[in-house]
Image (cartoon, rainbow, N blue to C red):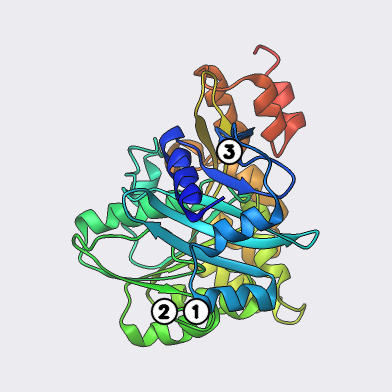
Amino acid sequence: MAAFDIKKLLQSVVSHGASDLHLVSRTEPQIRLDGALKPVNLPKLTGEDIEEMCYSLITEKQKQHFEEYDELDFALLIPGIGRFRANYYRTLGDTAAAFRTIPIDIPSLDDLGAPEIYKKLMQREKGLILVTGPTGSGKSTTLAAMLNEINLYEHKHVVTVEDPVEFIHQNKKCVFSHRGVGEDTKSFATALKFAMRQDPDIILIGEMRDKETIEAALTAAETGHLVFGTLHTSSAAGTINRIIDVFSGDEQPQIRAMISSSLVAVIAQALLPKLGGGRVAASEILITNHAISNLIREDKVHQIYSQMQLGQGDTGMQTQTQALLKFLKDGKISRDIALQYANKADELSKATQAY
């Protein structure tokens, strides 16, 4: 196979509206459509085929990095086709690759059908807003739509730190400084340390994966910046516990105090297959209020869920169960799918006897 074929393959991923392309030896190329993998009608690939296709897309420096570490993460723009996040890896000694499509046109919050509360969150001047969920749950897209909302109405300096840079924002009213880890900066923690000297209003952290990064994010949120971040957690309360657990026991009271004062919201989302095709985002939304802040500070995170069940009308909060029930009522998803994705399947099961 020649280099032309990989571009042709990526073109077909875009034209099918697929989210991902997988190249793994001993099987045909596979695309992910509406959350499910489907083989492409092509011959099975060998490791050599994949290596030739993949190497045609990267620089000599990237090739050396891959051969040294057996892992390579990068963003790729193919003119006339689209933008992709790519990961090269090894499986049983062969080269393999996963490509994720990144829309060039950034969706609006209305395009995504996002809850109205998201627009209110965008009006905050400072604090920490976390969008969480498993890989492929649309976190990057939600964050891009949020920043797009700010870009339409506010004159702000936005610094993004990502690995790799995904959505590229055109400067409408905001000025964007996109920084790729490994290309524009050495690490998330280093970029955040120096971001404070770049006069940012808003900071986006692609992934809060270590103690240093989390600490820097909390400090930035406390000192008058609006900070967006992501974590691979599936519930709002689970997100708070994950952050606290990164720190040792004697550091935890101070971290709880920092979270209680700086956390604005946690949006934990999952993408579910929709009846009739497509996907829909079920979001658990935690908005910090006085009661929630106290629970975080007093190490009573386990009580947050019942507060979220209470705080509906006034605050815009919702539990994942409530989001799933609404989709069921509107005929957007099946009961089986709702139960499959539910964080609290027993609670949902009791509430869905009628469906």
N-terminal of the two: label 3 or label 2? Answer: 3
Q: CA distance from mark 1 to mark 3?
A: 39 Å
Q: Amino acid at mark 1?
A: Thr
Query: Label 1 belongs to which residue?
Result: 219
Q: Is residue 113 left or right of residue 350?
A: left
Callout 3: SS: strand
Callout 1: SS: helix
Give the label on residue 32, or none.
3
Query: Label 2 belongs to which residue?
Result: 223
Q: Residues within 10 Å of mark 3 (few under 14, many from 20)?
A: some
- The one nearer the camera, 308 or 326, is 326
Can residue 4 be seen at all in this image of the molecule? yes
Q: Position of residue 77 (x, y in %)?
A: 39, 59
**Do residues under tags 2 and 1 come within 8 Å of each other at their CB atoms?**
yes
- The one nearer the camera, 259 or 281, is 281
Q: Residue at x 52, y 16 (%)?
A: 331
Task: Specify the quadrant of the image occupied by residue 11.
Answer: top left
Q: Amino acid at mark 2?
A: Thr
